[in-house]
Image (spheres, coloured by chain):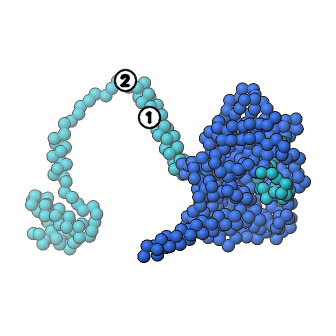
Chain colours: A cyan, B blue
Amino acid sequence: MKEKLSALMDGELDGQHAQRAINAIADEEELKQVWDAYHMIGDAMRANSHVAVNVRQQVAERLANEPTVLAPRRWFAPVRTRRAGAVALAASVSFAAVVGWQQLSHGNGASVMADRGVPVAALQPVQQHDDLYLAAHQEMTADQSVYKVSYGNGVRH
Amino acid sequence: MRLTQLSGVCLMGVAVLAHADDDWLVVKKVAAAARQQPLNGTYLHQMNSSLETFRIVRSGSGDNIQEKRTSLDGPSREIIRKGLELTCYAPDAKSLSAAKVSAMRLFPALLPDDIGNIAQSYSIKRSGKDRVAQRDCNWLELKPKDSKRYMLRMCVEPASFLPLKVITQNAAGEVVEQFTFTEIELQGPKDKGAFRPQYKQNYVLRSASAPAMTLDADAPSEVSGMPSGFKLLRAVQRTLPGQAERTVRHMVFSDGLVMLSLFIEPQADGRPERAVNLHGAVNMATAEQGDYLVTLVGDLPEPTMLAMIRNLKIALKP
């Protein structure tokens, strides 16, 4: 009989023989298990990742043991708490986003810097009053080779 | 046997010293190349979490150096150097004031012309090779011997001694300011018109004739409490730009790497002492001392500036 199952799997049985084999499998539990085992072997040999793992028995048992929950549907929905929950969820999500963004921007300073471009304010951070000292400092210090030439050696230390 | 060991140690010591001397010589060459090397390139300037790009062209030599830098982003600005003259150009007043601030930092010319007693306050170290703007360069570190100053790291192109990248770091190792060429040719532009200004509005930062300042020779103030290594370069009695009626005493100090300005003026209106960041690594601190308002401006960390201005002792001669 097993040879017949094998032949059936390979599609070598024609109409009438095939029907007889199928009926035999349906009738006899032992043959059915053999049939399943053959398919598993075939899957494994074809390196099929979905190797037919036989969990039917266990799943059926678990289902039988699970208690059936019979709960009536609520007549009124607790709208407020649900909304509050949604708001809280949204708030925490956005907070997480902000924190994440900050972390990211710290870790990736260069690109953020480039994104920001040139803030004009950064170029003019000085108050008018500070500006004068800056200009005076600059006049005396920036590019001193020029300064030196213009003063020659007349500078006292 | 001992003699050989001893002489070996001595020889090694001499070699190390000579090596350091060589490195200081490199710093001198870098300072000169940064001012004079003809070039044609683009550089990035990063500070205070902002990033700017400039194009720079330079040619000529000696007193006839011509240089033009143009901002490629932000307000339109041009800073043109023609021999002794330094002028900003911009299309409008707002951009012009931004140009004045940008002229604070004339990369690659960041080192003082005369490094003087730099070895007293900084140690020098070579720290490996790198590549900047498609050119090989060698890192040179100027590390302060105390924690009051910034550390300066620069990557120097070996043939021309031009610094291709300059990084200023604070004691915590954070980058305060950095410049880097993104592309550079070591020759000036072929087009003679490359140095012509594009905008009409201008402000002369330094005129070709000597600036109107009198040398304060007869009454130099006594200043003590400066961090070690700072030497008085010059002291003048002057007016602040655009304020003809206000006379201040301006003293310039240098530790061989950074320049520090000290302003002293008679004034006491109860202003609190404060320190502010002006531009990149340039900070300012101001405080009152008796009847005088004292202001420090220079490339030193803000905490140092505040500590300094508290410790300064100034004795003005009548």
Residue visible at 66% across and 44% down? B226
Query: Residue B78's spot in the image, x, y percent?
Result: 80, 54
Location of the N terminus of chain A (image quadrant): bottom left
Q: Residue furthest right?
A: B209
Q: Determine whether the residue tagged by mark 2 lies in a helix, strand or loop.
A: loop
Amino acid at dot 2: Phe
Give me the disc on residue A89. 1
Residue visible at 17% across and 50% down? A58
Residue visible at 18% across and 45% down? A62
Of the pair A52 and B61, the residue shown nearer to us: B61
Disc with the residue nearer the chain's start (1 vs 2): 2
Q: How many numbered marks have been drawn onto this rendered protein structure? A: 2
Query: Residue B100's spot in the image, x, y percent?
Result: 79, 48
Q: Are marks 1 and 2 in contact (CB under 8 Å)?
A: no
Amino acid at dot 1: Leu
Query: Residue B240's spot in the image, x, y percent?
Result: 82, 40
The answer to whether residue B54 is visible is no
Residue visible at 70% across and 50% down? B231
B36 w.r.t. B267: above or below? below
B29 w.r.t. B74: above or below? below
Q: Which residue is mark 2?
A: A76
Q: Determine whether the residue tagged by mark 1 lies in a helix, strand or loop.
A: helix
A67 w.r.t. B197: above or below? above
Other-residue count near label 1 (Cα within 10 Å), few / some / many at <14 / 14–19 / ≥20:
few
Which chain's residue wears label 1?
A
Query: Residue B256's spot in the image, x, y percent?
Result: 68, 55
The answer to whether residue A59 is visible is yes
C-alpha gap between disc 1 and disc 2? 22 Å
Of the pair A48 and B226, the residue shown nearer to us: B226
Give me the disc on residue A132. none
